[in-house]
Image (cartoon, rainbow, N blue to C red):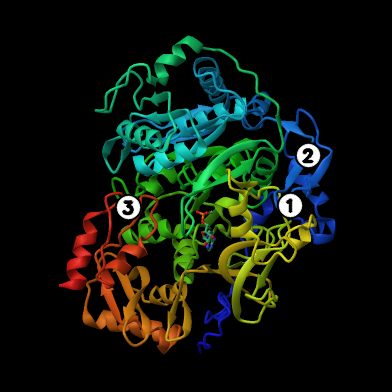
Amino acid sequence: MSEKENGSGAHYAVHWQDEDNINPPAEFIGQANMTDPGVFDRFSLDKFPECFKEFADLLDWDQYWHTTLDTSDAPCWNWFVGGKLNASYNCVDRHLAKYKNKTAIHFVPEPEDEPVVHMTYQELYQRVNETAAVLRDFCGLKAGDRVTLHLPMTPELPITMLACARLGIIHSQVFAGFSGQACGERIWDSESRVLITIDGYYRNGKLLDHKSIGDVAVEVALKEGQEVDKVLVWQRYPGKYASASPMVEGRDYFVNDLLKQYVRVRVDPVPMPAEGILFLMYTSGSTGRPKGVQHSIGGYLAYVAWMSKVIQDIHPEDVYWCMADIGWITGHSFIVYGPLAIAASSVIYEGLPTYPDAGRVWRIAEELDVNIFHTSPTLIRGLRKAGPDEPAKYNYKFKHMTTVGEPIEPEVWKWYYKVVGKGKAAIVDTWWQTETGGFLCSTIPALSPMKAGSAGPGVPGIHPIILDNDGNEIPAGAGKAGNICIKNPWPGLMQTIWKDRDRYVATYFERYCKDPNSKDWRDWPYMAGDAAVMAADGYVRILGRIDDVINVAGHRLGTKEIESAALTVEEVAEAAVIAAKDEIKGVVPDLYVSLKPGYEASQELAAKISGAVSTVVGKIARPRQVFIVPDMPKTRSGKIMRRILASISNRADVGDVTSLSNPEIVEQIRKQVQD
Ligand code: WTA
């Protein structure tokens, strides 16, 4: 089954069975925003780049652009050149005429006895203006300055982002779960003089002290050489300070106090060039310091607006809930900018999805009548583990669901479809990255059938190609994986890595660019860094990062395939495979699994799981050991920390685990495996 390693990197055989097509429900098609099959023709490569006018025309421009794409600084592409616009105006002001009384943001606090806040577009407008006044008049910030935000999931986060955007200030939001060290490094890299944080927020029933992390961040930044002169502190309960950390005189200010001077002040949105910078979003590379992914104003906003309308199928009357954290790109693009650009009502939930119990998510869905739901495989697996029968107990109805962030195992997809979606929702599996601004591969929900585990073809305007290491195309249907690349630029693609153009070129283009001096976009395929296989019908299945490959005795195995095989066993809730060192074979897979509630670990079960891997992937992939553990070590964003499991298997130091959502599990697993 497996083929011998042939030295060509990402190019390896795959063992996936193709899944059946499932058609979207007729009811969904009847109301969908995009039902015109001609859309792919409108966006064929010979219509590039002018086809993207359709994206730009979803926005209001202060000055219309004259050039769709300028390639003179390849591969730093400039879109909609000559145009001027304001992102805050496009997400807020322009909706007032029709929608000022409509909810822009439904904020659901974690404590269930705190009422949901339904913030209208008018109120959002008011609060964005006043906050912008603080930034401009109190902090002296102006277009092009960078500001670091370290905010959790409360409405103050989008309000602050939109206040920055109103003035052309570049925001750099750091995920609230990140440490002071991580935040400080990002303050330093972005050269922010202002940090915006909050005193506390709820997570798993506790009001966490958040402001104190900001203090560490400021110290770390200073050590690196970047001074922060103002720390603005929102309060979870205005007027009541929830942090133990002292306010530093002359440096720290409560935003709620400052706002009193700016009541009802209006701040005109600053018309910004389309190629201005909207935000930085730091993402970790496999090596070295985090990369400040730099996104434009015009191209990015046009891209996420169109995707929200066509792929997310958001109408102004829908209730749309994306369960990502705004501290990640999914939240920037598909909680804040995309949905608000098209006048959506977007749900923001503060806390842990399973707090206080496994029914919470479905209660929120029922209460708010959410009809579009957007989340990740990690969370779907987590919800299935915590309460596989919970969705059926609640009376909600999703018309549309999204999965994003990692490959979804067909078993998990089917649970999502049948149990969460009750068989009535259209599902899109959207493959993309922080760097790409918005979706790259996905089905158009009313136009194409779904296929469990496949993201689908390129979205309109995106032309994917699978290349082997020598740059040869691996044809669709060849059953071989390779490096997935995009042949053409698109408006949502990052502009560069902040202050590091060389790293941008090296990371995403160098490998397949034949002429580094070329100004022709055709010479610059974008390399995503993922391994993928394209089926005969053009549907793309992502296998994971190119590096997530285990090489057993010269056989390259995709970790996702092994995990997916383990998940075909009824009892298994989550699976993680890691490379364990082996004297003979180099490395062998060790498999960690956790079970659904009501099942007990046993030798027989471990053998059954091991057997499933052998059957589905091949004997070569049979795990050395199957460890049935009570839970997986997970980050605050819910990703399984395979690195820690690998350290345990290899009896190496697990490092600092304090930032995990469940640090106590590490010692338990270590004992189980090593003792
Ligand atoms: C993975 C998240 C399979 C992929 C939007 C990518 C996926 C990385 C999918 C980017 C999907 C994202 N199917 N894999 N639908 N979506 N990925 O930057 O490996 O946090 O390169 O952006 O997640 O992660 P990032």
Residue 419 appears anywhere in the view: yes
Indicate the amino acid at tag 2: Val
The residue singled out by tag 2 in the image is 81
Of the pair 350 and 663, the residue shown nearer to us: 663
Q: Residue 358 carries which label?
A: 3
Ligand 1 near label 1 (Cβ, under 8 Å)? no
At horizontal 36% and vertical 58% (from top left) the residue drawn is 382
For the residue carrying disc 3, how many other residues have a C-alpha within 10 Å: few (<14), some (14-19), or many (20+)?
A: many
Q: For the residues marked 1 and 3, what is the alpha-carbon distance in whole angstroms? A: 49 Å
What is the spatial separation of the Cα atoms under label 1 and label 2, in whole angstroms?
Answer: 15 Å
Residue type of the residue flagged with mark 3: Ala
Decide: marks 1, 2 in contact (CB < 8 A)?
Answer: no
**Residue found at x 46% / y 34%:** 149
Q: What residue type is labelled 1?
A: Ala
Q: Is residue 631 above or below residue 367?
A: below
Q: Nearer the viewer, mark 3 or mark 2?
A: 2
Sequence-earlier tag: 1 or 3 = 1
Which callout, 3 or 2, points at the residue further toward the start of the chain? 2
Sequence-wise first label, 1 or 2: 1
**Quarter of the figure that contains the C terminus:** bottom left
* Residue 288 on image: x %, y %: 46, 55
